[in-house]
Amino acid sequence: MVRAIDEHTITDAVIDQMSGTKNERLKEIMDAAVRHLHAFAREVNLTPDEWIQGIRFLTATGHACTEYRQEFILLSDTLGLSSLVNSLNDRRTIEDSTKSSLLGPFYRQDSPTFELGQSVAEGCPGEEIGVYGRVIGANRRAVANASIEVWQPDENGFYDLQKQDPSEMELRGRFFSDQEGRYFFRTIKPRGYKIPMDGPVGDMVRAQGRHGWRPAHIHFLVGAPGYREAITALYMADDEHIDSDTVFGANESLITEPKLNAPESPFGSLPAIHFDFTLAAAQDAHSGRVGADPAQLVKKAEEGH
Amino acid sequence: MVRAIDEHTITDAVIDQMSGTKNERLKEIMDAAVRHLHAFAREVNLTPDEWIQGIRFLTATGHACTEYRQEFILLSDTLGLSSLVNSLNDRRTIEDSTKSSLLGPFYRQDSPTFELGQSVAEGCPGEEIGVYGRVIGANRRAVANASIEVWQPDENGFYDLQKQDPSEMELRGRFFSDQEGRYFFRTIKPRGYKIPMDGPVGDMVRAQGRHGWRPAHIHFLVGAPGYREAITALYMADDEHIDSDTVFGANESLITEPKLNAPESPFGSLPAIHFDFTLAAAQDAHSGRVGADPAQLVKKAEEGH
């Protein structure tokens, strides 16, 4: 029987046509996606002109994605979706582990390994600080030989990947915790920076009257066998955009600041940030991460066809 | 004050940050988009792995958009969004005008003009039929000199734009109604065809166990000064996919078939489709259309930057 398709019947017609989806989880996700997409269009009474503007925006966002840039992740970040997916993922952990923050587009897997106490900022101008603490399990037991990868922008708010020769690495490095789970290294105090504002997402952010800044932060990826990888960042309390992060990554529990004469600091009089990373056991792990190497992403997307 | 961002507070945090949007309608649309996007992620408890698959899918969809192909429109079509936007637009007309259907990707503005009664299928193999009727206003008054553009696929289900030399036009043409609002022309009976299945949307449709076919149809774009443009299509009742159109365009009121000795047929014994197009007055017009020339779309999207 032929269906009368109108604004009331279309949603069921689509869900009915998708009902042969073999993968149950895909079916669940697409059913919900269609229901919410349609509810959105009905709620705002979307016009054909507005629809075509949306198509143009998504097309431009796709075309802005290259081996070195992931505009759809930036869109997800600026609409708070990445932060929400992180929060949902954190909630799956029963134990009280360190909160996730965005991986962002500047992570790379091959950063150089340093000895504890060394600086990742050798030769970089800026205000030197120390960072130290412990990697522990939810039972507060030390996690020895945990891998701690750190990366951050320079004094002008740029990551090495954004510079003229992206093969030269700076302000990134990997450390391993000692037998007591301790880690400590030196760097410079990071600076805040704007998200890339020269693409469609920048246009959107400007049209929304948003400033586009992220508060200063240092990225961390902390992992050890048997534990769930922690992707997070520490945010500088004195940054003027600390309560208006354009990508909603700066969370209360991740805000800190370098302090003089911090307790048990291995850095003496150097201002130092003290932060302990608490890892969840791998048994509740959903190992995925929100954010990824854009080059890898784009390649995988293309290989899909 | 720094916010504790979690799965409950993130939506308000985003809406708060977008509250400076100057364009009230953009604000309304983006607020609703964010609420529905977040509600979707919460409802399905979206994992980071699933999120990244979504990013990859959207990126691949963007990369599949070229001057000659609009994969995001195809995605909108296959998820029933285009059909919904058409229905919402039809509802804005108080008068009882002809229902809209999808413009699709094969419309072009420069199709050749024919005299009433001529064939748009000269030299094309296939089963010849006639098409005739009137263009009328909602008051059933004749609309003289209305422009009636028609386009359709050939006997094998291909449009001229899909052939080796897209500059050669066939099976498309423009007619003008006479003083009584009458139009009539000859063509061949159209065949059903599959949507393009070699891109990310094809992958989705296959994963959902859908056949990918559209029932046979002839496209119409009918317009006259003072009236709202009607973008629609007539669907062949005997097509085996008439009740499972992959893009949800085939609607009850647009389903018809060539009949022998149809009443008042100018074609004598030739099987003919009889259909009257009822145009709404321009005063309730939202002139936009769902669907557009992909080349123009892509160019406009790129010019945006």
Image: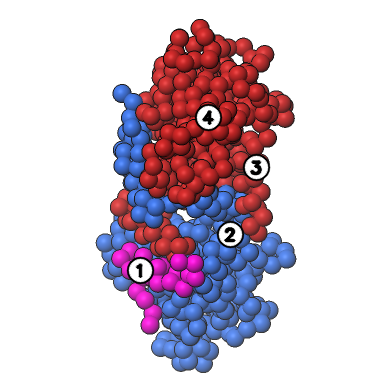
Chain colours: A blue, B red
* Chain of the residue where label 4 is placed in the rendered structure: B
Cα–Cα span, label 4 and label 2: 46 Å
The disc numbered 1 marks a residue on which chain? Answer: B
**In terms of depth relative to the viewer, which is nearer, A266 or B44?**
B44
Tell if the residue under mark 4 belongs to the same chain as the one under mark 2.
Answer: no
Residue B295, numbered label:
3
What residue is shown at x 34% (from left), y 74% (from top)? Answer: B4
Chain holding disc 3: B
Q: Quadrant of residue A302?
A: top right
Q: Which residue is mark 1?
A: B12
Tell me if I can see residue A261 in this picture.
Answer: yes
- The foreground one among A37 and B136 is B136
Mark with earlier residue (1, 4): 1
**Direction top: furthest residue:** B269
The picture places residue A252, in percent across and down from the top left corner, at: 37, 76
Query: Magenta part of the protein: which range?
Result: B1-24
Q: Quadrant of the N terminus of chain B?
A: bottom left
* Numbered mark located on residue B181 in the image: 4
Circles 3 and 1 on the same subunit = yes
- Please identify, in this view, whether the residue under mark 2 or under mark 3 is nearer the observer: 3
Q: Residues within 10 Å of mark 4 (few under 14, many from 20)?
A: many
**Measured Cα–Cα span from mark 3 to mark 1:** 38 Å
Q: Position of residue B102 (x, y in %)?
A: 49, 36
Disc 1 on helix, strand or loop?
A: helix
**Front-lying residue, A8 or B50:** A8
Q: CA distance from mark 1 to mark 2?
A: 23 Å
Q: Dot 2 corresponds to which residue?
A: A200
The front one of A205 and B247 is B247
Q: CA distance from mark 1 to mark 4?
A: 55 Å
Residue A131 in the image, given as x and y percentages of width and height: 49, 79
